Structures are given as structure tokens and as C-alpha cells.
Image (cartoon, helix red, strand yellow):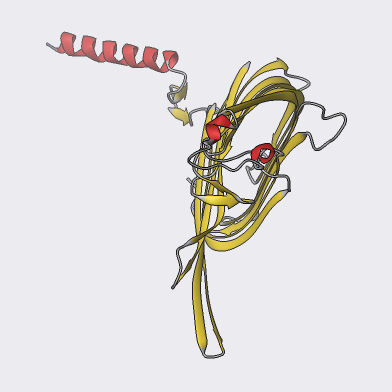
Amino acid sequence: MKKYCLFFIALSYFTAGRSFAQDSTSVKLVDSATATITAPVETKHLWHFSLSPSLGFTFQSISKDGEENQDLLWLGQLQAKLGYEGEPFQFNSSLFLQYGAQVTRDAYPKKTQDNFLLSLVPSVTLSKNAGLRLFFEVTGETEMGKGMVDSAVTSFLDPLFLYETLFLGHKTHVSADDGSSEFELVFGIGYAFQQTRTKNFPLVQHRQFVVGEGNPLQNVQDQFTVENGYSIILQIDYTKHIGDNFSFKTSIKSVTLTKENFIQSLKNSRNGTLLLAGLQWRFLSIDYTMHMLYDRNISARRQLEQTMVFGVKFDI
């Protein structure tokens, strides 16, 4: 019996020793005499995900000439990113949602901000040393609720702007060794196809027509307007952790898409710029948002929205 016990003990020790040698993620046996053990080696995560919802309120009460007016302004915002960084293929996606309204006692809520932007960007490395990549970006932009642009009524997916661009660009990603700061730069130039989907929303060039039950919009304009031209992309992201619970984040993305005859007039192009900046301490935040859009199909004038909100924000 003692022989069998000694045999199983020796077999177990031999099996355990082989498992340590074969599994590189397990703890490593450095010295069998002193049994010194080192920590497992950390591996770089190829997938990254972030989710940041925020909500802010502003309440005001004004008394004048015996009348008291009270209203509530609220703004909700959501930023989400999902990406994969590998070689030679990469994938990045981003979602930006923003909706705000003004609520008064004697009127229906009035929408103040409304933005929905979704981007999917796969890429492949052409030169790792030069940071040169070939990007393919698909982006959709619309509003979530009913509103007005000039004199035209908007709604969810009406209008919807889509573009698909293949562009050659450079990507730089720098982060501090202690993780206190992170910087990313993407820029490039390429070619894009653009679609504007409409249902009841009349484009600028068709607003001289009277649209009613006897003159449906389908007889005036196509549901999809297809255009093409060159694309110029610029995106900057910067994050700085000032303390354990205090951080600063900013990002800007600007996309210029040319259309037909843009050489004769720069008005024959579309530019959309989204700037986000914010300070956050624990779950309290101050966020500034600037969204600028110029598109001759949507409006003959530049559209500019700016907000600064103090509220609560969570990072996941």
C-alpha cells in the first residue's frame, strides 16, 4: 500500500510540474527549492468598450407684472464606443445620442436639442511604421423626435443622412505609461457616396412646391437622393486624469463631403463638426457640446447648436 501511495504522490507532482510548464498564463515556478512565485504576465486587451450616459437639469422661475413663469430645461446625452485594435485589421464604432426639451406649465414640451450619430469604421494597416491605414467608414445621422428645420417638419429617420467613404489616412495613438493621459489622432482623404433619405421632409430645392393631399411629396422628390464626391476626415480624442476622481475629456470630429460642381462653389459641399468637452469629478460633470452642420439639402443656412450642462455622469 505504501508503494502505491508513493507512486501516486510522485505521479501527481510530475503532472503538476508539467501543467506549470505548459500554461504560460498560470503562475510560474522559478525556484523549486525556495518556491518563489511571480505574478502572471498581463496581456494587452484588443477589445475596448466605453459607455458614458449623462443627465442635466435647469429650472427657472420668473415673476414679472404679477405673472409667474416656470419652466424646466433638461438634456440627456449618451456616448458609447466599441473597438478592436489588432494587426493588420482594426474596427471602431461610436454612438452619440443627445436629446433635450423645455417643459412649461401651459404648453407642450418643446425640443431644444436632438442628435443621433452612429459610425462604423473598419480599417486595415498598410504601413505600421508610418501609421498608414485604409479606412472604410459608414455613418448615419438623424433626429429622434419631431422638430423643425427652417419651415419643414422633421421626425425620426426623416430626413436620414448616410455616407460611405473609403479613405487613406493616418492614425496616431499615444498613452502615458501610468495611464494618466491618452491622445488619438485620425485624418485622411478619400471618396464618398452620400444618400439623403426623406419621406415627408421636403429638401431645400423642392420647397417651392406646395405639398398637400392632392400633391404628395413622392411626386416631387425621390425618397433617396444619391450624391458622391471627395471626403476629408479629421478626428481628435484626448483624455487626461488629473487626479484619482477628476478627469478632462475632449473630442472633435469634422467631416467634409464634396458634391457635384463644388469647384465652382464651396456651397456644393457638406460639413459636419461635433465637438465635445467635459470635466468630471466622481459622478458630477460639466459638459460642453457644439454641433455644426451645413448641408444644402437640409437647409440653406448653417445650423449651429451649443450647450453647456452641469449634471451627473457615469462611465462604464
262 and 84: which is toward the camera = 262
The residue lying at 76 percent from left, 20 percent from top is 129
Measured as percent of width and height from the top left, residue 181 is found at 67, 45
Image point (64%, 38%), residue name = 203
Q: Is residue 80 above or below residue 40?
A: below
- Residue 178 appears at what percent x and percent y? 64, 43
Whether residue 26 is visible:
yes
- List x then y, in percent, for residue 44: 55, 28
Horizontal relation, residue 257 to residue 287: left or right: right
Residue farthest toward the front in the current orientation of the protein: 214
Q: Which percent across, then down, holds residue 214?
A: 50, 38
Q: Is residue 312 visible?
A: no
Nearest the eye: 2 or 86: 86
The residue most toward the left is 1
Left or right: where 7 falls relative to 70: left
Picture quadrant of residue 26:
top left
Residue 207 lies in what quarter of the image? top right
The residue lying furthest to the bottom in this view is 66
Question: How many discs appear?
Answer: 0
Above or below residue 117? Residue 221 is: above
Give the quadrant of residue 221.
top right
As drawn, is 289 to the left or to the right of 116?
right
Classify 137 as above or below 214. Answer: above
Asked if 232 appears above or below 63 in the picture, the reply is above
The quadrant of the image that shows the N terminus is: top left
